Amino acid sequence: TRGSRATHCIEYADLGASYYRKYFYGKEHQNFFGVDERLGAVAVSLRREEKEKEGVSLQYSYRLILRTSELRTLRGSVLEEALPPTARPPTARGLSPKKLLEHVLPDLNLQGLRLASNSPKVPETLLKLDEQGVSFQRKVGVLYCRAGQGSEEEMYNNEGAGPPFQEFLELLGQHIQLRGFTKYRAQLDTKTDSTGTHSLYTTYQDYEIMFHVSTMLPYTPNNRQQLLRKRHIGNDIVTIIFQEPGAQPFTPRTIRSHFQHVFIIVRAHEPCTERTTYSVAVSRTKDIPLFGPPIPPGHCFPRTPAFRDFLLAKAINAENAAERSGKFHAMATRTRQEYLQDLARSHATTTSLEASSSRLPLLSLGAKRKERAKGAKACELQSAGALVWSVRARDGDRAAPELPCLLGISAEFLVLIEAKGKRVIFNCSCRDMLAWTYSDCGLDLYYGSGDYISVRLPDGQGDEVKDIVHRLQLVTRGCETRELTLLRNGLGQLGFQVDSEGFITDVERFTFAEKAGLQPGARLVRVCERALPGLSHAQTTELLRTAKKVTITMVPPDENGKPRRSFSELYVKSLQEKRRSDSPAREPPKLGGLGSESEGPCFGQLLGSLPSFMSFFLLPRPPLPSPVLSEAGESLEEEWDSISNLATACNSILEALSKEGEQQIPRLHHGWECPSRSLSEKVSHLESMLKKLQEDLQQEQAAKAALQAEVQSLRQNNQRLQQEQESAAARLSQVTRLLCGSPGQSL
């Protein structure tokens, strides 16, 4: 459904199509139109922005869009600080448009560019041009093939749906009544029922999908062609062929249509049972590129929501890929050319690019690529998008082969993409990054529970290592490791203790270990050149006890002296805590008043919102582009411990008071000879104590309710962040495919 967690990447989508709408439309900017001898009609949009952050002086950035008849659009932004000193503007007004474009697009013919008119039609046309291929509505045909059938005519003439097909449709979408339907209708009649009374509709990620189901469209007796059905399904780019067991093998040669380009064949196995599965195959025209998600060879999908998500993503990606094929690509290119030619012909003034230079201060864009500004990289390293380096990578095993890869580090993820196969071979969240060890030409990156990968830069690019480290410092909570060589005392002891997870629990005073800088809370990631995740606790202890020369690589504790843990470890730890709290042997403490059935906040309730909770409430807000979690886990544990201790104390007091209420009067009579007035004072005092305790507990209950409401809000925020992370990974993958692909025509 819309807003659900994205399980599959949407491919062939122009993720920057809304760039003009978001950063230019309705804001002060300049547009230039003209004709280039090599590129044809072009349209350029320029804008200078002010950026002011807390504790940071005023900064300027410049945004630019270049549109040509090619369907790919050049979009980007540059910080003024990132420009070489020789290219920076001498005044606060910034560079002129002419100088800006000379630096950014040296191959573009600037003589033919003219300033756009102030007509309101200009930004509207540019919006249509940039969002030309953007649509979040899809229509998909569904044909029903019974056992023994195989031809198009047989499928169109199935009047009703059998139980296996009904079962499949229930999984695929929602059965809706067409009359009065107000959402996407895909050319179906929602007023007079001329196209049937019901249909199948669903949503996936941001897309609305209406299915043209053959058995739900009008059936015409004695008409083998069934034109009322075919005029809808035959005009759908993507068609799902559902086959019952025993249906003949499908071949697209049986389909007579010039518009159906992709067929997704779904065959049911053991339908209408608890063992129902589906096998999937795809048939596409030759000029349509491959699209995902990939189908595992020989795999059968169980009847689950995961299969539905797979099928919907496959159908959406199929249509997106088809739009990149020759026929559709030519149509889109022709439409784009007409837009650009109309802008250059009808909406350009006589003001040249040079004459417009003094009218609007535009940004100072850098000089030629060969000019590099000292310190300019610090600005681009602050980018939320991925920065990419060419490296050779291998996993922690020294014997593993090195692979040429692209290392990409965004504000949220670190990924390695194989250069040859263009596939992601490693990825992890920046929240999972623990530490790094770097040398002149490479790094070891530690993540998760202490595993690591090694990356090495090509010869002559050793300076790039510092940039990678700087980037890691900005977007992770990791730190540089320390390598220590430890000496033994006269008894052969090292003077410290380590637990099963590799954390240093105690360092004896005045030992060589303390002198070398080992601290409680430090984390071992290597012992005697061996990675700790590959060793059992017994092996680690034996190695430390018997090695002649003990060398360790450790991750120092954080600034509060707490051990550094990755988010994945915190997540697993929270699950374990939840299981313990749910165990019958250990009931959660109760925080309610006397006789109350309400329970204290369970740690599991915080699980869904763990990242946001830790980032925004337990840590000071860092001036970094991404949320960070290393020290949050311990703070969260302390808060939970305090709540648990309070609950336990309340229970103990209540239990003691209840017992005291039963035994107080006999004990008083036995021990004292006090008048009735003293006894009444004692009872009054006890009642006041109970009243105060109940008030405190009521306040605690109110605080618990507020906390639960906040946790619910945080859980929703966390789900949104996870969607943005997966969307960022999808964008990074697409950008990487462009970077790794064959170089396009130079501008």
Image (cartoon, rainbow, N blue to C red):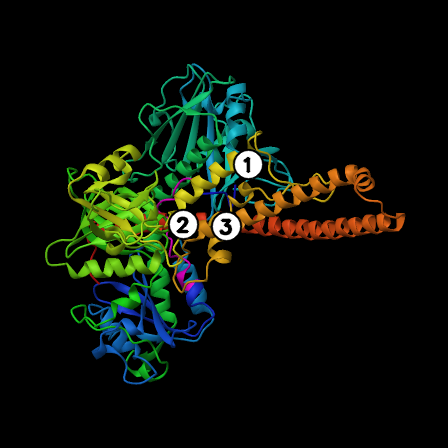
CA separation, marks 2 and 1? 31 Å
| Residue type pointed to by label 2 | Gln
Find residue 411 and report its horizontal and vertical position in percent.
36, 56
The C terminus sits in image quarter: bottom left
Please tell me whether mark 1 or mark 3 is closer to you in this view.
3
* Residue at the image point whose x is 39% and y is 36% from the top: 314
Q: Tag 3: residue type?
A: Glu
Measured Cα–Cα span from mark 2 to mark 3 = 29 Å
The disc, 1 or 3, on the residue closer to the chain's N-terminal end is: 1
**Residue at the spot x=70%, y=41% of the render?**
656
Residue 534 in the image: x percent, y percent? 26, 36
Callout in the foreground (2, 3): 3
Up/down of 336 relative to 235, above or below: below
Circles 2 and 3: CB distance less than 8 Å? no
Q: Is residue 293 left or right of residue 312?
A: left
Category of crowding for the residue at label 1, using alpha-carbon neighbours closer than 10 angstroms: few (below 14), some (14–19), many (at least 20): some
Front in this rendered view, residue 343 or 48 = 48
Which element carries disc 2, helix, strand or loop? helix
Q: Which residue is mark 1?
A: 581
* Label number found at residue 638: 3
Which disc is residue 725 wearing?
A: 2
The earlier-in-sequence mark between 2 and 1 is 1
Check disc 3 and report its element: helix, strand or loop: helix
Tag 2: Cα neighbours inside 10 Å, few (<14), some, or many (≥20)? some
Count of marks placed on residues: 3
Magenta region, main secondary structure: loop
In the image shown, does 423 or 294 lie closer to the viewer? 423
Residue range of the region highlighted in magenta in the rendering: 7-21
Q: Residue furthest left?
A: 459
Mark toward the viewer: 2 or 1 = 1
Q: Where 299 sits versus 531, above or below?
A: above
Q: Where is residue 651 shown, x and y percent of the image? A: 66, 42
